[in-house]
Image (cartoon, helix red, strand yellow):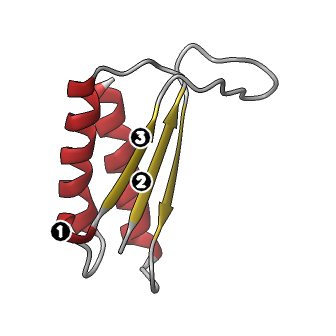
């Protein structure tokens, strides 16, 4: 079961959280043998996040846990897709 944890300093509306969850369900299929059916998503907003000692206006930390191995190229593609969806949704 893959787990994706999204922590952000933004305050998100329920619709934004629902959209992120739904889109992560689509994006997870980039990775071999992963589907929305077994995906767990944890979204926490309103966090205090520092980067390089300062609080950026917009920040997020995304932690992805997978069981098994995955080719680096697919991980990179997945990462780009997650970055894009978070930018579009928030």
Which residue is situated farthest in the right direction here?
Answer: 53
CA–CA distance in space, label 2 to label 3: 17 Å
Residue to which mark 1 is pinned: 37
Asked whether 33 or 73 is in front, the reply is 33
Q: Quadrant of residue 12?
A: top left
* Picture disc at residue 14: none
Task: Name the residue: 29% across, 38% down.
Answer: 85
Q: Quadrant of the C terminus?
A: top left
x, y percent for residue 70? 42, 80
| SS at mark 3 in the image | strand
Task: Name the residue: 52% across, 38% down.
Answer: 7
- In the depicted structure, whether residue 28 falls above or below residue 46: below
- In the depicted structure, whether residue 81 falls above or below residue 45: below
Circles 2 and 3: CB atoms closer than 8 Å: no
Residue to which mark 3 is pinned: 43
Q: Upstream in the sequence, badge 1 or badge 2?
A: 1
* Picture disc at residue 79: 2
Neighbourhood count class around disc 1 (C-alpha, 10 Å): few under 14, some 14–19, many 20 upward = few
Q: Which of pointers 1 and 2 indicates the residue nearer the eye?
A: 1
x, y percent for residue 45? 47, 28
x, y percent for residue 60? 52, 34
26 sits left or right of 75 in the view: left
| SS at mark 2 in the image | helix
Q: Quadrant of residue 9?
A: top right
Neighbourhood count class around disc 2 (C-alpha, 10 Å): few under 14, some 14–19, many 20 upward = some
């Amino acid at each position: 079961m893959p787990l994706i944890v999204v922590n952000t300093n933004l305050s998100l509306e329920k619709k934004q959280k629902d959209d992120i969850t739904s889109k992560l369900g689509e994006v997870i299929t980039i990775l071999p043998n992963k589907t929305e059916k077994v995906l767990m998503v944890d979204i926490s907003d309103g966090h205090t996040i520092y980067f390089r000692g300062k609080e950026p206006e917009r920040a997020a930390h995304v932690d992805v846990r997978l069981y098994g191995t995955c080719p680096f190229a697919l991980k990179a593609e997945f990462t780009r897709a997650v970055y894009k969806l978070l930018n579009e949704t928030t």
